[in-house]
Amino acid sequence: MSETIHALIEQYGLVAVFAGCVAEGETAAILAGFFSHQGVFVPWQAFVAVFLGAFGGDATFFMFGRRFSDRPFVMRLRQREGFDRAFDLMQRHPALYVVGNRYIYGFRLVGGVAAGLSSIAVPKFLVLNALSALVWTALFCAIGYVFGLGAEQVIGDVLRKHEMLLIGLGIGLVGGVSGWYAAHRFGGRTAGPAGKR
């Protein structure tokens, strides 16, 4: 069983990392760092997959807001809790918002659309988004890589490669469930009800 999981992660892992980083991707980025330390992914390839997913996700949602503001998908995002707050922050502090948006869990989807609906110039958004995605990628991949170092030191050489992969999957599961719980439990406390623009 674990050999099958190992083979699947090696074959499709970077695609999954990229897809996971398109939206709220902290867990995928941490796993990319962890699996890079374990030798499953080539570190620079994992870094590129995380960066492209993070940059591409925000750029895509920006373009949805900019070009498709009247489409049902965008209208639903505009109705989400936190959208009004995101749009207000974007209007008042555009550069700071674009750089910091990805660090606030639950804001990335509505944040990209809010940025697209604002008056920020596309080149400025893309440059700020690239810088933010670069720092974010380095930070979360490093967290995963350091966790891999720590796990190896604590556990030693007792665990074989496939057992480390199962630990990584467990970390991903715990991180994903924790992030989902935090977003649903605490997300409504800072954002008021969303209204139409």
Image: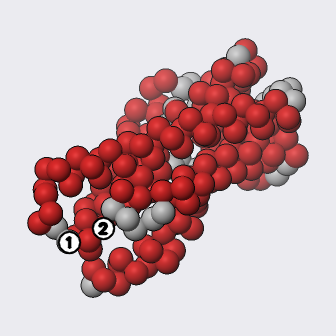
Position in image of residue 131 (x %, y %): 66, 34
Q: Amino acid at mark 2?
A: Leu
Asked whether 15 or 85 is in front, the reply is 15
Could you tell me which residue is drawn at 11 percent across and 66 percent down? 158
Against 82, is 147 above or below?
A: below
SS class of the residue under badge 1? Answer: loop
Amino acid at dot 1 = Arg
Residue 88 seen in the figure: no
Q: Does 48 sit above or below residue 131? A: below
**Residue visible at 41% across and 58% down?**
36
Within the image, what quadrant is residue 18 found in?
A: bottom right
User: In the structure shown, which secondary structural element does the residue marked by tag 2 occupy?
Assistant: helix
Which residue is pictured at 72% across the width and 22% down the height? 95
Task: Characterize the local packing of mark 1: few (<14), some (14-19) or many (20 or more) Cα atoms within 10 angstroms.
Answer: few
Q: Residues within 10 Å of mark 2 (few under 14, many from 20)?
A: many
Which of disc 1 and disc 2 is earlier in sequence?
A: 1
Residue 132: which disc? none
Q: Position of residue 146 (x, y in %)?
A: 32, 44
Using residue 18 as the reference point, say whether residue 125 is left or right of it. Answer: right
Front residue of this view, candidates 25 and 72? 25
Residue to which mark 2 is pinned: 165
Residue tagged by mark 1? 160
Q: State if disc 1 and disc 2 touch (CB < 8 Å).
A: no
- Residue closer to the observer: 197 or 92: 92
> Is residue 16 left or right of 154 when viewed as pictured?
right
Relative to 29, does residue 196 appear above or below in the rendering? above
